[in-house]
Amino acid sequence: MKNKRLILPDMIKGLAVLLMIQVHIMELFARQDIYDGLCGQISLFLGGIPAAPVFMLMMGYLMALKNKSSVDMLKRGIRLFIGGIFLNIGMNFHLIYNIIFKDWNYNLWNYIFGADILTMAGLSLIILALIHKLAKDNYLIYFIIALIITILSYFFISLDLETSYWRYVLSFITGGTSWSYFPLIPWLAYPVLGYGLKLLNNKYSFSSIINNFWSKVTLILITLTLILSFNYGFSNSFLLTNYYHHRMLFFLWAIAFMVVWFYGWYQISKLLKNTIFFEFLQFLGKHVTSIYVIQWLIIGNLSTEFYKSKNLEESVMWFFVILFISAISTYFISQTRFYFTSKKLQKIK
């Protein structure tokens, strides 16, 4: 089971964090004309479904893979949510400093309580823990709940909660504010579905059917559907309001895209498994939270100075610089953690 996890999920998460870094740079560093052009649209598309939805689906899948208890998921969810708030403060530290000490005209609380991926991941695990307590291992219940969540998005997508008394709470749940990027509705659907998919895999084993005739026919039909409807998926990925607060149809398109995406990288992994690039993706995937936090601390604070001022070549350069710093920092953190854990185990023995 451990080897399976290393072959595909870690590689997929590693790709997701690479695509997240590049899209953050495009959004915050690149000049507006680049952002609005074809390069910007492609960047936003690659930083769309292959990034956050993939990451959230895999989070749910891996929770089931590791057979985490409801209590463990609840504890991790609380830690992630609190960590997400602290990350908001850290990544906006330069801006917050200027707001407090230089009277910049921005609302401090909108940045501290921004609904981003970590806060959403934390809340998702808290709710997933409750769902697991009730549904146990019935994968159909998880699928139904995921679908209901995407249907609920139709009721909240047009809400304007900027002046609501509960705006800082509702931003994490329903959206409706400019600082709500990843509200629970519809994003909770991805980890819930991911959890259900692992339960389904336990029963029918995807690996045993992935290469049979009907699976290949289904994959071809899904691919053709994606090609014919690609303009829909592409345009809704780079229009960020549509992406952050999407509805059931885009959710279904994203799932179809991920089926092809996962299968494609499953096949590619057979060719890349002995390469440095493959090992690097696995490293990124294994330490995805650390990489994510470090790259945001760098990008968030630099963006106060660099905001939409870099040309394409400079943006690409900054991608590699930030990726290098994030990876090296994560490596030393992981080695330090391993060292102290080993010392602690030796003392216990």
Image (cartoon, rainbow, N blue to C red):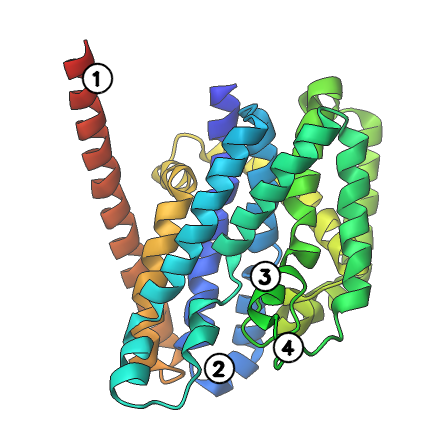
Q: Residue furthest front?
A: 165
What residue lies at 56% left-to-right and 81% top-to-bottom? 37
Residue 196 or residue 111, whichever sits in front: 111
Mark 1 = which residue? Answer: 345
Mark 2 = which residue? Answer: 34
Tell me the SS state at disc 1. Answer: helix
Q: How many residues crowd around disc 2 within 10 Å: few (fewer than 14), some, or many (20 or more)?
A: some
Q: Which mark is residue 294?
A: none
Q: Earlier in the sequence, mark 1 or mark 4?
A: 4
What residue lies at 23% left-to-right and 49% top-to-bottom? 329
Q: Earlier in the sequence, mark 4 or mark 2?
A: 2
Tell me the SS state at disc 3. Answer: helix
Q: Position of residue 146 (x, y in %)?
A: 75, 45
Q: Quadrant of residue 25?
A: bottom left
What residue lies at 82% left-to-right and 41% top-to-bottom? 144
Q: Position of residue 113 (x, y in %)?
A: 47, 67
Look at discs 1 and 3 and give the one toward the viewer: 3
Amino acid at circle 2: Ile
Amino acid at circle 3: Phe
Mark 4 = which residue? Answer: 164
Asked if one can make out residue 235 in the rendered structure from this viewpoint, the answer is: yes
Q: Are marks 1 and 3 in contact (CB under 8 Å)?
A: no
Residue 163 or residue 292, whichever sits in front: 163
Q: Is residue 214 above or below residue 2?
A: below
